[in-house]
Image (cartoon, rainbow, N blue to C red):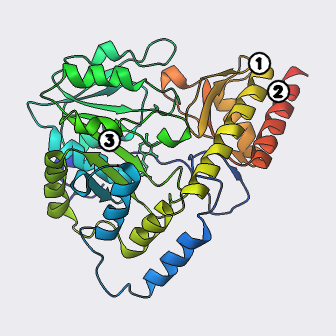
Amino acid sequence: MSRFFSDKFSKLAPYTPGEQPKDLQYVKLNTNESPFPPPKSVVEAVCAEAAKAQLYSDPECSLLVEKAAETFGVKKTQLLFTNGSDEILNFAFMAFCDKSTPAVFADITYGFYKVFAELHGIAYKQIPLKADFSIDYRDYLGVNATTFIANPNAPTGISLPVSEIEEILKANPDHVVVIDEAYVDFGGESCVPLIEKYDNLLVTQTFSKSRSLAGARLGVGIACESLIADLNAIKYSTNPYNVNRMTMAAGYASLCEGAHFAKTCAVIEKNREYTAKKLAEMGFEVLPSKTNFLLAKSEQISGEELYQKLKARGVLVRHFSAERIKDYNRVSIGTLKQMDIFLENVRQILAEKEQ
Ligand SMILES: *Cc1c(COP(=O)(O)O)cnc(C)c1O
């Protein structure tokens, strides 16, 4: 830290992204990216747009918003696109929390919620997940705070029924409830249809996981018009051109590829069920996932040791040191071939331990 760094930020503990090794030697199952490249039409749209990169992007993302309104079945005024969904989450902390309105979220959830709260000096409360790592929606009734729930949750993969989220919305009419649907496309249930009914609901989604665009950085917020207007006030006070031309074109082309999208999501779900079954056969406890990853632990080996041994063998998974989940590893779901390599290495590591 230099002596010039603002006091305000001197105690920040920034978010730690998963490793992004520079050599592509690894079977990379650590950051929940899609194993599939984006469809050709998306790549072509990006290239065509790059030829116009001397011009600013459209701050209103008009074409993309029009297409997305059609896809999600909402009005254009109910959408706001951002630089990844991390940005819409950041905007939500700025817009809907302050001294009198703290934030609440689970003790085991997306690590960025805590980082954003600390960045903005917002008080927060972490509500423990149940022993089985699911959320008890009753813990969130009448919390007098802005609620952030990843649904399905990360890194557990467990999803909460929309009917229970509706109870949370009803019990907190004077506070915003943010539902982070980063993984909803892998078998979860979306809250988007509820935005008509609840003016305190903000749903966030991302193109990073199910749409193979992690490197393009595109996220979206879906809410009633007045919440979107608030978020726009933050956007136009920070970065009006937050979505670049190439990404905007990629997002549009992606939304035109409905069949490809459905097919790749279905493959991931199938590979997830296959991997969960094989891990269970090897004695792992595997949490029930509706995402593109599994959280699993074995009695035979610690989470840290398995992570290290897999890494030494060229397979990257994600290990978290947080007390409640340190025995587990999070494994992103890749192609069947990648999952077989992962499973075979796990098998060999466990066999070595037995000798
Ligand atoms: C990956 C992820 C995000 C954000 O992804 P972006 O790449 O910024 O769109 C948000 N929430 C959760 C729970 C995630 O796992």
Label pair 1/3, CB-CB below 8 angstroms: no
Q: Residue at x 78, y 28 (%)?
A: 278
Which quarter of the image is occupied by the N terminus?
bottom left
Q: Give the label on residue 200, or none.
A: none
Circle 2 packing at 10 Å, graded few (<14), some (14-19), many (20+), is some
Q: Residue at x 29, y 66 (%)?
A: 242
The kind of residue on which mark 2 rests is Leu
Q: Residue at x 70, y 29 (%)?
A: 276
Which residue is at the front of the view, 9 or 142? 142
Circle 3 packing at 10 Å, graded few (<14), some (14-19), many (20+), is many
Q: Is residue 207 visible?
A: yes
Q: Give the label on residue 203, or none.
A: 3
Residue 230 pos. (x, y %): 14, 50
The kind of residue on which mark 3 rests is Val
**Viewed as shown, does residue 262 lie left or right of 238?**
right
- Which callout, 3 or 2, points to the residue nearer the camera? 3
Give the residue at mark 1. Answer: 283
Which residue is at the front of the view, 228 or 209? 228
Q: Residue furthest right?
A: 355
Asked which secondary structure carries label 3, the reply is strand
Work out how far the residue at label 1 is from the one at label 2, CA to CA, in angstroms: 10 Å
Asked which secondary structure carries label 2, the reply is helix
Asked which quadrant contains residue 168, the reply is top left
Residue 36 pos. (x, y %): 65, 57
The kind of residue on which mark 1 rests is Gly
Label pair 1/2, CB-CB below 8 angstroms: yes
Q: Residue furthest left?
A: 100
Q: Earlier in the sequence, mark 3 or mark 2?
A: 3
Q: Give the label on residue 350, or none.
A: 2
Work out how far the residue at label 1 is from the one at label 3, CA to CA, in angstroms: 37 Å
